Amino acid sequence: MKIFSSKQFYEADKITTEKQGITSVDLMERAATQIYGWLHQRLQGAQVPIHIFCGIGNNGGDGLALGRLLVENGYLVKCYIANYTDKRSPSFLTNYSRYKDVTKNWPLLMTCVEDFPAIAREDIIIDALFGIGLNRPPEGWVKQLIQHINTTPAYKLSIDIPSGLYAEQAITDHEAIIKPNHTLTFQAPKLSFFLPESGPYVTFYEILNIGLDEEYMQTTKPVAQLIAKPQAQRFYKQRNKYAHKGNFGHALVAAGSYGSMGAAVLSTKSTLRIGAGKVTAFIPECGYNIMQISVPEALVQTDVNPKVLSKIEFDFMPDAIAVGMGMGTGKESVAALRGLLKKVTCPILLDADALNCISSTKTLLKLIPQNAILTPHSGELERLIGEWSDDYDKIEKTKAFSKKYNVIVIIKGANTIIISEGEMYINTTGNPGMATAGSGDVLSGVITGLVAQGYDPLMSSVFGVYLHGSAGNIASQLIGFEAMIASDITEALGDAFIELFRQDEQQQAPAD
């Protein structure tokens, strides 16, 4: 699914009205009809007071059009206009006039705090104050109105985007944003729905198709791609019945040190669990028994150094390499990583201490192969690219880093972001239970195992992040967020593959 900018949405609106021979008011009517249908399906005519707060732009016009439809169908509606300026959009004025034609209870013009209505817990609030065109935070009594709405216990529904939240701009005033229970957004979600600073304002959203020009939506390059089940299904490669382990690659996991062998175990086991044909763990000698007992399916080779990796040498040609998980950051580790980077000829994933070694020894940056996969958590990313002022600054700096060194960077988080060649992919799976030690080691193994099987590095990154999050979701449903540990994610990877197509199978079942 594509994520577009505000500018692109305005272009889509314009092209849609031109090609379909309709007006912007007609398009607004479509949007209002969709929202009405969503509400009516749930309310079924229930006589609960509905308070619609409208701005004086197109978002307010949506609110007025919705209010008219609700009034015409017998609902108890009260509309309020935040009259903060004399400027009004033409579409707003048209819908204001249409609303007045169907009821004697005209919208209340609010100009100060004294105009704020009392709202009961059982009521419903619909937020239509500001849309995606907002470019500065609400101030004065309008900000106080937003705070008034937020403090009421009534159910809150935002139209297109929570008022006060920008579509693709950093938040400048957290106290001037509606906090809805649900958001109904038009045609496609907005970038701000998926970033750490702004995402908490959109806890639940649904997409309403308002019929924007299909050609424009299909051919226009988006600001990001959203990866959900339909996209992930297209990545999957069906296995041949007559295949053998040699067809699914041999991966090398170079990881671990004294006291940190768990990271090596988690990565190695996940590389196998995701489907790699063979996996060799290259570890310090101290971890030999640990690895052989914990992952009996893995081959093991050891470093001459008993406690850390000092020289990564192996006697086969791997199809994919993962390095860094728990390996340490001392001089020996830096030397081991440098030696590996100088000779590597297959796709490589750099995680954890490998990234920390690179951050402390910048000369290693020049040795990173093209299309290498980097999987930093927030702290590791900051050491690589420097501090950032907000989520958007972080994205731009990561894009610059990715482009400069021609690498794939995975920004791990609630909605993990994969960046490659200026393109951005946003994952939709995962949950708070995955915020646990070792989760990232599992992800490194998942991606490496996919690369070993022949998925290209970018596809492995995007697909791997999705499956990792899906496995986390499955595990959390069994044991809850708090009880989850990283190995639970590994154990659920098989179910993540099954889940990938479970819904389609149900839909294809014959009817009774």
Image (tube, helix red, strand yellow):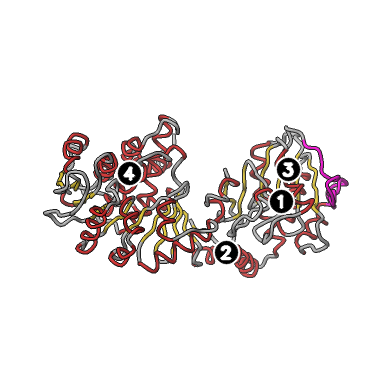
Residue 201: x and y in percent read 60, 46
Kind of residue sitting beneath label 3 = Ile
Residue 278 seen in the current view:
no
Proximity of marks 4 and 1: CB atoms separated by less than 8 Å: no
Name the spot of residue 191 as percent of width and height, x first. 54, 56
Select label 4 or label 1 by which is in front: 4
> Disc 2 marks which amino acid?
Asp
Where does the image place residue 478, in percent across and percent down from the top left? 40, 30
Query: In the rendered image, which residue does mark 3 sit on?
Result: 149
Please tell me which residue lies in front, 298 or 344: 344
Residue marked by disc 1: 128
Label 4 or label 1, whichever comes before in sequence order: 1
Q: Quadrant of the C terminus?
A: top left
| Residue sitting at x 66%, y 68% | 21
- Going from N to C along the chain, the mark reached first, 2 or 4, is 2
Q: Which residues are magenta?
A: 100-119
Do tag 1 and tag 2 residues touch (Cβ < 8 Å)? Answer: no
Q: Mark 1 and mark 2: span between their CA atoms?
A: 24 Å
**Farthest residue toward the right?**
104
Instruction: Please identify, in this view, whether the residue under mark 1 or under mark 3 is nearer the observer.
Output: 3
Image-quadrant location for residue 461: bottom left
For the residue labelled by badge 2, is the local secondary structure a helix, a strand or a loop? loop
Please state which of residues 349 and 491 is positioned toward the viewer in this rendering.
349
- Residue tagged 4: 442
Residue 88 visible in the snapshot? yes
In terms of sequence position, does the residue under pointer 3 or pointer 2 come before the other? Answer: 3
Question: Is residue 223 found left or right of 181 in the rendered image?
Answer: left
Cα gap from disc 3 to disc 4, whole angstroms:
43 Å
Give the amino acid type for the residue marked by disc 4 in the picture.
Answer: Val
The amino acid pointed to by label 1 is Ala
Point out which mark residue 213 bears: 2
- Residue 133 % position (x, y): 66, 61
